[in-house]
Amino acid sequence: MQLSICLPETPLTVTPEQFLAIAVANPDLRLERTANGELIVNPPTGSESSRRNLSITAQLWNWAENHSELGVAFESSCGFRLPNGSTRAPDASWVSRERWEALSPAEKEGFAPLCPDFVVELRSKTDSLSTLQEKMREYMENGARLGWLIDPQNCQVEIYRYTGKTVEILQQPDTLSGEDVLPDFVLSLTRIWP
């Protein structure tokens, strides 16, 4: 059964159960739910954004495979149920092994009830920078330890840290360090910048 979604001008709010039913019925849609229950339908990205995101995800996956004892990496279709009640899907993410193994098999199969330790959001042409910045703050408030907002349009990266430090902004860096959250992980940005 295919469900067509036409959103009214006012936000459409759904319960967690309704959100799950909509997500299951529409596996090709990229859906998120805010803490207030607002349904967010994210359009597909363009080819350039998809190519950039694949580069980020592949690099994170390669590092995670070589450091599998530390945790598990996820790509952009994975949703997490954050402590504040929202369901979010970062473009790339990672969860420590200890936190992942603390989940039940059922929790691992559904929207894992936790905030990833590490998140990446890649800004596409259709993304509002302020909306992504708000999303990054939400991740930090819900327990993420490190987050990168990569903005190819402005050739900059905003680095968010759980420690409450001010957001660090880098202009067109060549690489990013996973710091103590992802030891020895270095993301090359050479395929990200226009």
Image: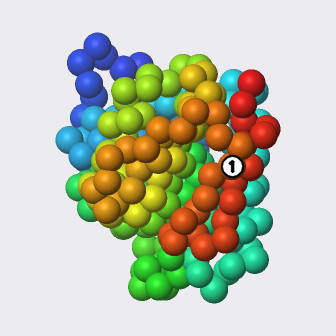
Residue that numbered label 1 is attached to: 175
Is 53 above or below relative to 164?
above
| Number of marks present in the image shown | 1
Q: Quadrant of the C terminus?
A: top right
Query: What is the x, y in percent for residue 185?
Result: 66, 65
Which residue is rendered at x = 41% and y = 19% of the image?
6
Query: What is the x, y in percent for residue 154?
Result: 57, 23
Which residue is rendered at x = 43% and y = 79% of the image?
99
Dot 1 falls on a residue whose secondary structure is strand
Q: Residue furthest top?
A: 9
Which residue is rendered at x = 69% and y = 60% of the image?
186
Q: Is residue 184 in view?
A: yes
Query: What is the x, y in percent for residue 133?
Result: 38, 35
User: Which one is in front, 39 or 152?
Assistant: 152
**Which quadrant of the structure image shows residue 155?**
top right
Q: Quadrant of the N terminus?
A: top right
**Which quadrant of the structure image shows residue 157?**
top right
Question: Image check: 88 left or right of 182?
Answer: left
Query: What is the x, y in percent for residue 84?
Result: 23, 55
Which residue is rendered at x = 69% and y = 24% of the image?
46
